[in-house]
Image: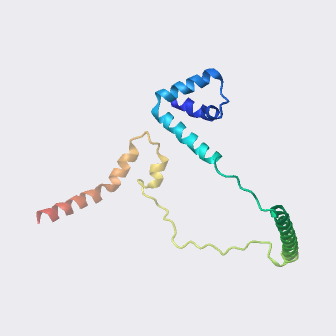
Amino acid sequence: MDCREFCDQHLAFVDDTIAGIELVRMQRHLTECESCAKQDAKIRRALLLFRNLPSIEPSANFSDRLEARLKECQTEQLVHSQRNLRLGAVAATLASVLMLGYIGTTLYGHSETPHDLVMPPVVASIPESELMPASGPAMVTSVSAGLTIWPAALFAEQVPVRFAHSQLELANYTR
C-alpha cells in the first residue's frame, strides 16, 4: 500500500468501518511509513480532544428567544421585499413612459427630417496628367511578372538618381 491509498482510506480506518484485509494492510503501512504514522497520531489526538470537550447546554429560554428573533427577521424581510417591489414598479413605469415618449417622438418627428441625403460637391484640385511615362506604375502593372521588361524599366527610372547620389557621396568622402 502506498501513502496516497492510505490517505484515501484513512477516514474509514479511523472510524473502524474498513474490511478486515484492508485493516491489516493499513496497520502494516503504519508500521512501515513514519510520516503516515505521525499523521494518524495527530488525527487521533485531535479527535480525542474533541470528544472530551464538555457539551454546551443552551439556556432555558433559548428556544423562545430564537423563535422571537426568527419572526422579527421574517417581518423585516417582508417589509424590505415590499419596498423593493414598490421601487421596481416605479422604475418599470418610468422606463415605460420614457420608451413611449421616445417612440412617439421618433414616429411623429420623422416627417421633419429630409429623406434625401445631400452631399457637398467634389472638386478636383490637381488634374491628372494625360501623358504617363512608359516606366510608370501603369506600365509595371500592365506587364506580367514573368517578363524581364518591368525590372529593367524600374532600374532605368532610378539609375540617374543612384549615380548622382553615389557621386555626391564620393565627393563628400574625398574632401
Q: In which quarter of the image is residue 146?
A: top left
Left or right: 127, with 62 as reference point: left
Q: Where is residue 90 in the image (x, y as percent from the top left)?
A: 87, 75
**As drawn, 85 above or below 37:** below
Q: Position of residue 38 (x, y in %)?
A: 49, 37
Q: Position of residue 173 (x, y in %)?
A: 14, 62
Coloring scheme of the render? rainbow
* Residue furthest left in the image: 175
**As drawn, 22 above or below 45:** above
Q: In which quarter of the image is the C terminus?
A: bottom left
Residue drawn at (45%, 54%) of the image: 137
Left or right: 175, with 87 as reference point: left
Tell which of 44 and 134 is nearer to you. Answer: 44
Left or right: 44, with 109 as reference point: left
Tell which of 5 and 11 is nearer to you. Answer: 11
* Residue furthest top in the image: 21
Tell which of 84 and 54 is nearer to you. Answer: 54
Q: Quadrant of residue 107?
A: bottom right
Residue drawn at (59%, 73%) of the image: 123
Q: Where is residue 35 in the image (x, y as percent from the top left)?
A: 47, 35
Q: Quadrant of residue 109?
A: bottom right
**As drawn, 168 above or below 159:** below
Mark yes or no: residue 1 visible.
no
Residue drawn at (22%, 58%) of the image: 166
